[in-house]
Image (cartoon, rainbow, N blue to C red):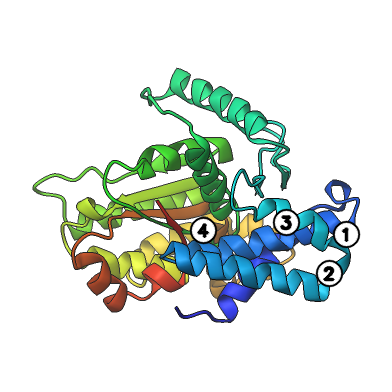
Amino acid sequence: YEFNIRHLSNVFQGLLVSEGEQFPTAEKFVWLWLHESERVYWDRLVSPEDQGKYNVIAQAQCKKYFPAVTGSITRFYATEAADPLVFCHFPENINDKLYDMIPDIEKMSSILEDALREYNETNAVMDLVLFEDAMKHVARISRIILNEGGHALLVGVGGSGKQSLSRLASFICGYDVKAIQISSTYGINDLKDDLKWMYNKAGIKEQGVTFLLTDSQITNERFLIFINDLLASGNIPDLFASDEVDGIVGALTSRVKAAGIVPEKKAVWDYFLTDIRKNLHVILAFSPVGDDFRSRARKFPALVTCTVIDWF
C-alpha cells in the first residue's frame, strides 16, 4: 500500500464538511474522525486480515489520544452485531445535504427506499435490493462525489451493483449521470464531444454531472489519456479548439467579474476549471479480474492516486 499526503488531506476534507450544530460533543467529532479515516484508509485495503489490523490500530490511536471516548467506540468494532459507523449527506432525508451520523440502519433503509422509489418515477426502473452493504456503498459514493474534485473508483466483479448504486447515489446528490454509448464507430472524437458536453454543463451551466465509465466501455486505451488528465487536474490539453476556449471565456467573463476577479483569459480559464472540479465527478466501475486493471493503473496513475477506492 502507498499512502501519501493526499490521503491525509482527504481525512481533513471530510472533517471540514461537518457543521458545528450537528456535533454538540467532542465524542461525536471523534466518531467522525474515525469514520473519515476508515473511508480513506480502510476502504483501500484488499483483505479482511488487513482491515482487521487497521481496526486494531484505529482503536489504539483513539485510546492514546482520546481516552475519554474510548468506551463509546468499542460498539463500532465488535466482532458480532457491531453498530454501524456511517456518516452521510442524507441522515434525515435526501434534500437537506447535512453531513451527519445515521442513527440506525432501519432509518437509512427507509430514506434510501424512498429515494429509489423517487428515482424510478423519473428514470428507467432499477429493481434494487438495498441490503446493508449496498446502502453503505451508496453513502460512500455520495460522500465522494459531493466533495470538490471527488472521483470514485469502484472495484468489483460484474453484476455486483456498481452502476446501479452509482446512479442512485448521483440522484441523491442531484447530479445528472452521463455514460458513453459505445458502438462499433465510437472513437476518440466522440469521447471528446461527450467530454465537451460535460464540461459545458458543469463549468458554464454549473450543474452537477456524474461521468460513469465502466472498463467494458474503454474500447480504445487512448481514452484513458483524457480520463487521466480529467482526474488529475480537470485540464485536458487540446480538448477545446482555440475558438471554443474564447467562447467559454466570453461566456464566463461577467461571472468572473462578479466574483471580484480580474477577467484575464488565464484567470477566467482557471475559474472554469474550478467549476469543473466542483461539478463534474467521475465514477469508474472496474473489475479486478484479469490483467487490464493492473496494467491500466500502472500506465495511468491518476486512476488510483486521484480517486477514492470502494471495493465491492
- Residue 288 in the figure: left or right of residue 283: left
Residue position marked by numbered label 3 in the rendering: 74
Tell me if residue 80 comes above or below residue 104 in the rendering: below
Distance from Cα at disc 1 to Cα at disc 4: 35 Å
Give the residue type that dot 4 points to.
Ile
Q: Nearer the viewer, mark 1 or mark 3?
A: 3
Q: Is residue 294 above or below residue 188?
A: below
Q: Which residue is mark 4?
A: 276
Q: Are marks 1 and 3 in contact (CB under 8 Å)?
A: no
Label 4 Cα neighbours within 10 Å, binned few <14 / some 14-19 / many ≥20: many
The CA distance from mark 2 to mark 3 is: 13 Å
Residue under label 1: 26
Asked if residue 205 can be seen in this view, the reply is no
| Of the two numbered discs 4 and 3 in the rendering, the one whose residue sits closer to the viewer | 3
Residue in view at x 29 percent, y 78 percent: 298
- Residue 66 is tagged as 2
The residue under the point 57% across, 65% down is 40
Of mark 2 and mark 3, the one earlier in the sequence is 2
Q: Amino acid at mark 1?
A: Ala
